[in-house]
DNA sequence: GGCCAGATGTTGACAGCGTCCACTTAAGGG
DNA sequence: CCCTTAAGTGGACGCTGTCAACATCTGGCC
């Protein structure tokens, strides 16, 4: 009645999967409190470990939040791809994607703000690598949806012109991003009408792009800034 | 050589204008560190007062940041109005306004994020009154610029239709807001091209709006949510 | 099979933070 | 001239992020 296996497993010394547990707890707390100002100690308490255990998995709080943000990007990307599956026409798929994007932000504003807000962008102006690649993958979805389908139908000439595709992507993304954040910050509302608002805004954008796509200045990048660091190829921890 | 007036005024017991000084210090630190995670104590140190003096002027940190945010809205509004003065044509004035808006965000991302990010929106979903009215004033500028000038020329029919004007405002605002934040978060860049990007995006938007303005669903509000609180008429502290 | 290295978890400590409290100082109105 | 009261001070409390030293478990190597 001393060693291990007393009754069942009251608390094995090693948790086993603390990394995932902590990230999950952070997502829970973030969703509940809608604030990134929770404490690492709170997460440790929820996970039933000592206040310092998380430091074996995350260098500091910023590192943890970067991991949470990366999960957020993956969730959003999944919601966007899922949304497109139900539709055939490129126009409908693009609209579904836009709806999913806006919904993702509105349904969890704190997570969306963590992903896109500046918390992770330190004074080195460099985002954590894990978050960078997750964001890049999500952006690729936007690019595909616009250039492969809807854009090809609606603005046929664009297919041959990278600058024009970039222009369309920039307009689409900034439009949806802005709408999402105005909804999230309650500068536009009510939130219940977000689907109709997405559609309205998308329609207005397509009207414009159908005529002509404004050329983007050369040298402009869209997505994570190029060349600042060797992106580590999404090789998540061995 | 004991009482007061020893040499000049080494530190009069009462500061005299601590409220303004603290807000100014907060703006300085915010600009320098590009983070809202400075401490009230740090501001007190800069102002040369005890760590508790600011509490005579601000209920808590959120209250102070709300005041800072309000100043940010007023600064941005001023930059926007100033920018329009140099131009005659409505189209040019709208473009100047867009440039000023984007510049304002890019030049001080932390302030812009404080203004539009969710820090001030507590779980009561209510922004501080002072910040609400400041935001409302700034939004009025957008409304004027679009409906009075550029919109009247470019989309004449809209003048008689509130829903269409709202639609144009929504598209314009969300477009510029999104572009600003993508630039700020370095998801689009480089920042030096922000003026050209503003122009491109504006042009694309106007192309669309020139054809038709998507109708906005009825019941949608743009700007601070209506009726949630009696906005205190901008009467700043008697 | 046994042992050792390293990964994982714990305990204790430290400075800094936001905020509350009781106290002090100065200034302006009766 | 006094006295209420706004403005500023100093100390305290509990909480936080982070560091350092120590404990425990586990997998790979002899």
Image (tube, coloured by chain):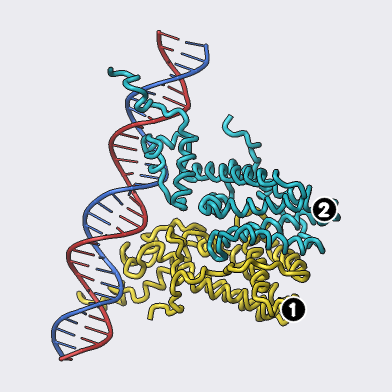
Chain colours: A yellow, B cyan, C blue, D red
Label count reads 2
| Label 1 sits on residue | A156
Quadrant in which the N terminus of chain B is drawn: top left
Callout 1 environment at 10 Å: few (<14), some (14 to 19), or many (20+)?
A: few
Q: Is residue C12 above or below residue A53?
A: above
| Label 2 sits on residue | B153
At numbered mark 2, what does the secondary structure look like: helix, strand or loop? Answer: helix
Q: Is residue B51 visible?
A: yes
Residue B128 x/y as whole percent: 57, 44
Residue B141 x/y as whole percent: 70, 46
**Circles 2 and 1 on the same chain:** no
Quadrant in which the C terminus of chain B is drawn: top right
At numbered mark 1, what does the secondary structure look like: helix, strand or loop? Answer: helix
Residue at mark 2: chain: B
B146 displayed left or right of A107: right
Residue at mark 1: chain: A
Residue A70 x/y as whole percent: 48, 70
Q: Identify the residue at horizontal 38%, vertical 81% (top origin).
A: A238
Residue B21 x/y as whole percent: 46, 36
């Amino acid at each position: 009645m001393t060693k291990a296996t007393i009754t069942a497993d009251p608390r094995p010394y090693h948790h086993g999967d603390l990394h995932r547990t902590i990230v999950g707890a952070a997502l829970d707390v973030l969703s509940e409190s809608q604030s990134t100002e929770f404490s690492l100690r709170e997460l440790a308490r929820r996970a039933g470990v000592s206040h310092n255990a998380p430091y074996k998995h995350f260098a500091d709080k910023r590192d943890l939040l970067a991991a949470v943000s990366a999960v957020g990007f993956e969730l959003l990307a999944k919601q966007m791809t899922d949304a497109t599956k139900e539709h055939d026409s490129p126009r409908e798929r693009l609209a579904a994607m836009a709806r999913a994007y806006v919904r993702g932000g509105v349904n969890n504003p704190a997570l969306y703000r963590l992903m896109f807000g500046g918390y992770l962008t330190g004074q080195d102006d460099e985002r954590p690598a894990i978050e960078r690649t997750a964001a890049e993958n999500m952006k690729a979805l936007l690019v595909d949806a616009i250039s492969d389908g809807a854009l090809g139908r609606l603005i046929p000439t664009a297919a041959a012109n990278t600058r024009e595709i970039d222009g369309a992507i920039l307009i689409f993304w900034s439009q949806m991003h802005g709408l999402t954040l105005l909804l999230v910050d309650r500068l536009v509302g009510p939130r219940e009408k977000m689907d109709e608002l997405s559609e309205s805004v998308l329609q207005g954008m397509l009207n414009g792009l159908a005529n002509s796509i404004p050329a983007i200045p050369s040298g402009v990048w869209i997505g994570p800034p190029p060349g600042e660091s060797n992106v580590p190829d999404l090789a998540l921890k061995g």
